[in-house]
Structures are given as structure tokens and as C-alpha cells.
Amino acid sequence: MGEAAVSGPVSSPPERAAERDGAWRRGLRTLFAPLVGALVGLGIGAVLIWLAGANPLEAYRAMLDGALGGRRQIVETLLKIGPLLIMGLGLTVAFRCQVWNIGGEGQYFMGALGAVLVGLWLQETASAWVVIPLMLAAGLLGGALWAGVAAWLKLRFGISEIISTIMLNFIAEYFVLFLARQPLKDPESFLPQSMQLVGPARMPTIYNRVHIGVLIALLLVPLVYVLLWRTPLGFKIRAIGSSRTVANYAGMNVVFGVAFALMFSGALAGLTGAIEVSALHSRLKDGISGGYGFTGILVALLGRLHPVGVLLAAIFFGILTVGVQSMHSIYGLPIALAQVLQGVIVLCVLVADVLARRWWRDA
């Protein structure tokens, strides 16, 4: 009777040991695959550098010096890390839900447009304490609404978000550039650019050129982690990403989850655009995006769709993006080499992850 009373769903010592062993294997794989993949990618990059006629070790050292060799270099690297981090965090939420948002560029432009409209409207009459928050809110809203178009097309007509977000990239970019050349054009400039943000509409700085947008990016890391792993909504997003059919049978609102994930990632892309146009560019013009919408995809994938991993990936890509300019100036290596290295490293990490899964499963 006493033995029957204590019987229940209690794990036996061998089962608990197996659970601990499984958790240890997963944790080791999480660290092992990106590290090995990155090292292999850097090795392939070294071969490419050697084929270009430079010493790989010296070139990599020049890259590190160019990104971290002094205060000015560190500032430039931080200015690259910020937008990459925000973009990667937003895409992490979408990809966790198996929603493939390729429209970060378009959402970036719409966020920048919203911020510029608010800034031009209020910069002569309000203080920075009013203008900057409203500009950031406009950026969030602009990016979210633009992503919402793709969400509506997907949920209403079944149009793939991959196709729709790519098409919306072009529409947003050329629409914003049209506004910069026509109704918003600076009458005192011969260049095709909008009127300039000044005074209260410029992002405050923390140190040198490092602005509060970098701090916002860092604060988003724990916030996105809490959203995905410590809230019911985050659980639903991950469950929908694992299996929409099972999530639907479990009573989860799959439509809301998909729409939220896509619009949340769009909101952070728009926030990136708002911060960049306020802090660095000060106006709408050609070349304000920096390709963050596409590089953010690589950051999210390299970070294994985890906020901490995305932070590390953003740091890595920031160093690579800034440091390759030193490789170019010293050794004459093409700037495009940075993009090649980024793609090769991410591909190697993904392949290493697949191989690690198979190896540990068979072990």
C-alpha cells in the first residue's frame, strides 16, 4: 500500500541521468557548431585572401586593428553593431515563428520615413525629450505597418511572405527616394535629398559619436529574450514555429501569432531606420540603409535565433564590416570580400550545425 502510494511520474535515476546527458549534449552542440563553423569559414576566407595576393594572418590582424585598434575604430564598430543587433533581434522573433521576413530593407526605409516626417514637423517647436521618442515611435509604427501588408497578403490570400516582403522592399525604397527628390526635397540643395533634421530631431550621443541608439539595441537583448522564453506569447510563437498544425489543435491563435511575429520584426527594422536617420544621416537620401535588412538575416542565423547569440553575431559582423576597410586600404583587398566572408561563415555555421545534430544523434 505504501509503495503504491508513492508510485507516480517520478523519473528514475537512469532517466534523470539521460536527461542531464541530453541537456549537456545540446549545450555542447550549441557552442560547438558555431565555433567550428566560424573557424572553417575564416579558414576559407584565408584561402581567398591568399588568392588575392595578401598574407592571410597579416590581413586578419589589419582587420582587427581597423575595428578595435583604438577609440575611433571602436566607435565605428559600435555604430555598426547597433543596427545589426536591432535588425537581427527582430528577425529572430519572426524566424522562431517560421515566418521568413526578407523585407527588412523596406521596413527600414518606412521607419526612416516616419521618423523624418515627425522630426521635420516638430523640430522647430518641441524639445528633444518630445521629438526623439515620437520619432522612434513613428519608426516602429512605419516598419510594423509595412510588414503588416505582407502579413495580410499571407493570411488573407496565402501569398508567401518571402515573395511579398522582397517586392515590398523595392516599393518602399523607391517611394521614399521619390519623396526625398520631390515633396520633401531640400530647396537649398542641388542633391536629391530631403530637408535636414536639426537640433531636437538629432539623436543624443553618449560618447563621441556613439549615440543612445546603441544603448537601445543592447537593452533590446534581454527584452527579446524575456518575450520569447518568459511570456505566454513567446511560447506560442515558438510553438507555432515548431508546428502550426499542433499549435492550432492546441487552441493557439496561429493567425495572430504569425501576424505578430512578422509585424514585430518589421517594427524593429523600422526602429533601426529611425535611429540611423536621426543619428547619422539626418535626412532621406540614397545609401541610408547600409544593407542592414539583408545582413540582419545573416546575424539572426549566425546567432542561432537566440538573443545572446544574435548579440555575439552582431559584434562579429560589426568587426568584420569595419575591419575589412583596413584590409582594403592596406592590402588593396576588395570591400566586397566582407560580404563574401559573411556568407561563407554563415553557410559553414549552418552546415556545422546539421553535421553536429547528426553526429550527436548517432553517438
Image (cartoon, rainbow, N blue to C red):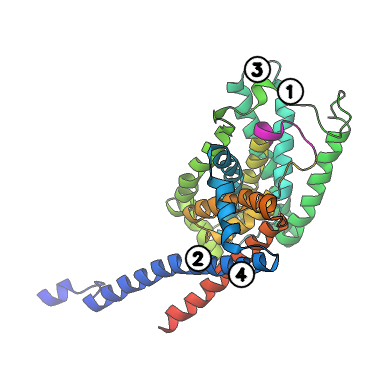
Residue at mark 3: 126
Relative to the observer, which residue lies in front, 77 or 247?
77
Q: How far apart are marks 4 and 3 (CA)?
A: 53 Å
Neighbor class of circle 3 (other Cα within 10 Å; few <14, some 14-19, many 20+) is some
Circle nearer the N terminus (2, 3):
2
- Nearer the observer: mark 4 or 2; the answer is 4
Q: What residue type is labelled 3?
A: Ala
Looking at the rendered structure, the kind of residue marked 2 is Pro
Q: Can residue 205 be seen in this view?
A: yes
Relative depth, front residue between 316 and 225: 316
Residue 109 locus on image (x, y percent): 74, 42
Give the residues drawn in magenta, as a range. 277-285
Q: Residue 275's x, y, as percent?
A: 64, 36
Q: Is mark 3 on a helix, strand or loop?
A: loop
Residue nearer the viewer, 7 or 183: 183
Residue 259 visible, this orientation: no
For label 1, the residue is 121
Q: Which of marks 1 and 3 is nearer the N terminus?
A: 1
Instruction: Using the numbered discs, state the Cα–Cα distance from disc 1 to disc 2 in whole angstroms.
Output: 46 Å
Using the rendered view, name the quadrant where residue 28 is placed. bottom left
Examine the rendered structure and indicate whether residue 150 appears above or below residue 119: below
Badge number at residue 44: 4
Q: Name the residue under label 2.
A: 34
Q: Nearer the viewer, mark 1 or mark 4?
A: 4
- The nearer-to-camera label among 4 and 3 is 4
Cα distance in 3D space between marks 1 and 3: 9 Å
Report the side of 297 relative to 163 (left or right): left
Question: Of circles 2 and 3, which is in front?
Answer: 2
Horizontally, residue 34 falls left or right of residue 326, namely: left
Q: Quadrant of residue 201?
A: top right
